[in-house]
Image (cartoon, rainbow, N blue to C red):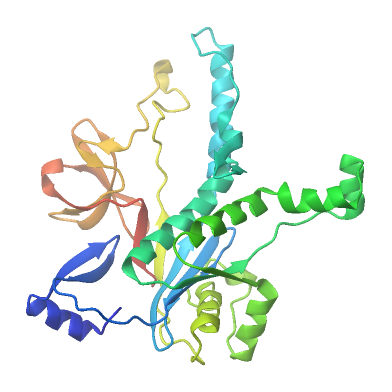
Amino acid sequence: MPCHPARARELVRKGKALRRFSKGLFYIRLTERADGTTQPIGLGIDPGSKWEGFMVGSETHDFLNINADAVTWVKDKIETRRNMRRTRRNRNTPYRQCRWNRSTKANYDGFKLAPSTHARWDYKLRIAKWLSKLYPISCFIVEDIKARTKKYKDAYTAFGQKSGAAQMFNSNFSPLEQGKKWFYQELGKLAPVETKQGFETAEMRTQLGLKKLDKHHKSSKSFYAHCVDAWVLVNWYVGGRIKPELESVLCISPLQFKRRQLHKLQPAKGDIRKREGSTNSLGFKRGSLVKHIKHGVMYVGGFLKDRLSLHSVQTGERLVRNAKPADCTFLAHTSWRVYAAT
């Protein structure tokens, strides 16, 4: 169970706990643990198309608010890869034989998910698994979202069948519905899952006198942009709260890796294609947090010859392009940027 920072410092000072970090979060690991009870802790999840809210809390305390950027680029990357492959086949160059595109019908425990759909929901699942290792979560409460369905006449025109077929089209053929069901199934392996409709969340939020920011401020890193709905969901499960205790927000932004790309998509002068891709930069895994002797904590990007590129954890902007590997001390592996909202 989470404890007060003063108690954590005392446990570390007496040698009863060890200091640890996990993707930017500080926690302690007890060296001596007696059997004890835990309070019900809920993890509220508010999915979104561009931004998502996560909140961990119990009946008495709020532990963590997370505003996460969604994975939105996979569909465009898949299309670019397809177009470049077709372009290569039109050139006078060796290429593999055309074969069935396995990625469009990848099977995940009985669910056929497109790459973009799987990337979106797997990202939420990874965050949930990460938090489950840090908190004894007893329930996941998710705001249920639904795909935009077609009316009976549209489905009838498309398929020439009756209303049963229209209902099947709406509920089973939508990538969002398939991804959502797979996500719920995987979450259920960690802890029980409860769902609430969007209008139910809005009603509970109104009853508590809380106001969510409007659609023009969705990109805000404020607690009231996305985390407020996650807090309402947790409060429904644990009960006993009338207003948020913690409004500070931890932001998460996933990093984009070009794992198997060999070179730039477009050639430079002289028809030379520069090297691009891979997840290793001079012995460092890309995205790894390092501490530079001059610039402090940053994460590793690409490299040129024998020098590294280092990026800001806050903005992702490249600040150093000629860092020596010897000047960098490895801290941790990570696949997303974690920083405090300002």
Q: Residue furthest left?
A: 14
Look at the image and tell me whether residue 316 can be seen: no
Q: Residue at x 40, y 22 (%)?
A: 273
In this rendering, position of residue 8 left or right of residue 225: left
Q: Could you say which is closer to the camera, residue 178 or residue 302?
A: 178
Q: Position of residue 298 (x, y in %)?
A: 25, 54
Q: Residue furthest top?
A: 92
Q: In the figure, 26 relative to 189: above or below?
A: below
* Percent of width and height locating residue 245: 42, 87
- At x 64%, y 70%, the residue is 215
- Above or below, comparing residue 229 to residue 258 in the picture: below
Is 289 or 304 nearer to us in this picture?
A: 289
Q: Is residue 123 left or right of residue 61?
A: right
**Looking at the picture, how far across and down is residue 30, in whole percent?**
17, 72
Query: Which residue is nearer to you in this view: 35 or 209?
Result: 35
Is residue 4 visible in the rendered image? The answer is: yes
Tell me what residue is drawn at x 54 percent, y 46 percent.
118
Task: Residue at 30% x, 43% y: name it.
Answer: 286
Q: 301 above or below 141?
A: above
Image quarter (top left, top right, bottom left or bottom right) of the N terminus: bottom left
Indicate the quadrant where residue 5 lies.
bottom left
Quadrant containing the C terminus in the rendered view = bottom left
Q: Between residues 159 and 207, which one lies in front from this camera angle?
A: 159
- Relative image position of residue 53 (x, y in whole percent): 50, 68
